[in-house]
Amino acid sequence: MSARAEPTFVVYIDESGDEGFRFDTANSSTRWFVLAAAVTRKVDDARLVHLARDVRARLNRPALCHLHFRKLDHQPRLFYVGRIAESKVKVVAVLVDKRAITSPETFRQESRLYFYAARYLLERVSWYCRDHKTASDTGDGSARVVFSNRSNLSYDSLREYIARLKEKSKSGDVRIEWQVISHEPAGICALQAKSCAGLQVVDAVASSFFCAVEQSALGYTEDRYARMLKPVVYNHHGKYIGYGVKLWPRELERGLETEKRFSWLRETYQ
């Protein structure tokens, strides 16, 4: 494959929750696994650096400290999310209820669930980039995808998985726009979140949606952060579910109209 021109978009990806299936034990896995993306135009990428800098200053944090959402108290979280909601990013979140997966053994293999969620995430990111490239944009319409580095994840394996998806898309139901997403090293990389403002922003996004679905030790969820992000959540002609917010397994969508745990989704994203 020949070298691509400069990308138009940069996509930052991070997760919240774990991929385990050990429930009802002393060291239980989380029920939910969330994988999220924050998309920005490459020319606007520096705005995320300024956003993180301004949040640190407002919260009286050191200039280069790592903004880790889960370590912030509630009020600082609200301020941080509020700043993201005012920014020029567009976000996508894939919410996986592991208890609802009918064949969990399929996803016990290391990184299998992560890869599967990444497929859904990259589909939606690619649709957004495809539909929002303008004549005035620089670059070729493609996206540079930056994953938050995980020590137990092989990014060579991830690229191979994406390459297999591309092959499957010729005959299957994979709906990634390949003019946007590439499995080549130039198109996908992994960085440490502590040195990348975009990854710290998407950490806040993933954690915000995780808090909305995962019960605390005392049995409560906190959906305010996820509601606040609505201005920057990807929607297609006003439709958020299935685009900026993807529930999986798909059967979860049947409970959107009736289940109390999804009231925040009904009220904000439907």
Image: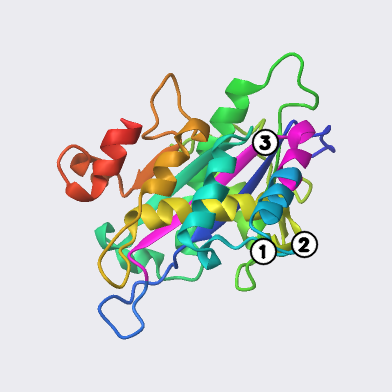
Q: Nearer the viewer, residue 76 or 98?
A: 76
Q: Position of residue 228 (x, y in %)?
A: 44, 40
| Mark 1, residue position | 149
Q: Is residue 239 left or right of residue 114?
A: left
First in residue order: circle 2 vs circle 1 = 2
Total number of numbered labels? 3
| Mark 2, residue position | 64
| Mark 3, residue position | 40
First in residue order: circle 3 vs circle 1 = 3
Please tell me which residue is depicted at 51% across the width and 44% down the height of the picture: 121
- The range drawn in magenta is 30-49
Please tell me which residue is depicted at 67% across the width and 21% down the height of the picture: 133
The amino acid marked with disc number 1 is Asn
Whether residue 35 appears in magenta in the rendering, the answer is: yes
Please tell me which residue is depicted at 28% across the width and 75% down the height of the picture: 23
Q: Is residue 73 left or right of residue 25?
A: right
Q: Nearer the viewer, mark 2 or mark 1?
A: 2
Name above or below for residue 196 compared with residue 49.
below
Query: How many residues crowd around disc 2 within 10 Å: few (fewer than 14), some, or many (20 or more)?
Result: few
The amino acid marked with disc number 3 is Thr
Q: Quadrant of the C terminus?
A: top left
Q: Quadrant of the N terminus?
A: top right
Query: How many residues crowd around disc 1 within 10 Å: few (fewer than 14), some, or many (20 or more)?
Result: some
Name above or below for residue 109 compared with residue 34.
below
Mark 1 and mark 3 in contact (Cβ < 8 Å)?
Answer: no
Q: Position of residue 6 (x, y in %)?
A: 83, 33
